[in-house]
Image (spheres, helix red, strand yellow):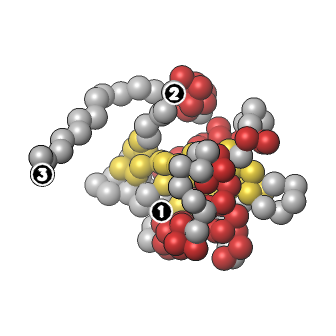
Amino acid sequence: MAVPATDEDYRAIDAALSEAFASEFAASEEGAARLRRVQEDGGAVRFVRAPDGGCAGGATCSAPAVGTAELAGVGTRPAFRGRGIAAAVTAALTETMFARGARSVWLEYSGEGSRRVYERVGFEPWGTRLYMSLEG
């Protein structure tokens, strides 16, 4: 498990997450800068280094607010899926935030496959989240 230390690390993580999420967002300097801000503002970014020195997969976790941190953006490049990378970064980020004093860490899963990954490292379904929007 690696902690990003250089601009190149942040760019590699941003590019890997873009690929992992089927280019729902384009990798960019702004994305890499956002990842750096998460790390610098009390959150955490972790990744697994690919054999070529880039990023095989990674994720972020927000700084705790009222004792709770949000783990998000867990992604693995398609060529590295099925190797436990998502579980490893999820577990590492959760442990990091608990060590920093968070009392809880939460996340949302996007499907049954990701739900099973998160449950294997100790997450469990709990509660309901409500969304509200205001009309134009």
Residue bearing the label numbered 3: 136
Residue linked to disc 2: 111
Q: Is residue 84 left or right of residue 10?
A: right
Element at badge 2?
loop
**Nearer to us: label 2 or label 1:** 2
Residue 42 or 50: which is nearer the viewer? 50
Badges 2 and 1: C-beta atoms under 8 Å apart? no
Q: Tell me residue 112's x, y (percent).
A: 54, 23
**Of the pair 23 and 90, the residue shown nearer to us:** 23
User: At 49% from the left edge and 69% from the top edge, which residue is drawn?
Assistant: 34
The disc, 2 or 3, on the residue closer to the chain's N-terminal end is: 2
**Which residue position is annotated with label 1?**
43
Can I make out residue 17 in this image? no
Residue 41 place in picture, x, y as percent: 44, 71
Residue 19 against residue 53 in the figure, above or below: above
Marks 2,3: beta carbons within 8 A: no
The residue type indicated by label 1 comes to Gly
Q: Nearer the viewer, mark 2 or mark 3?
A: 3
Q: Residue at x 58, y 68 (%)?
A: 28
State the SS at label 3: loop
User: Which residue ends up furthest to the front in the rendered image?
Assistant: 136
Instruction: Give the image location of residue 8, x and y in percent.
Output: 71, 73
Measured Cα–Cα span from mark 3 to mark 1: 33 Å
Q: Residues within 10 Å of mark 1 (few under 14, many from 20)?
A: many
Tell me which residue sits at (59%, 50%) in the image.
23
Q: Is residue 105 above or below residue 123?
A: below
Q: Earlier in the sequence, mark 3 or mark 1?
A: 1
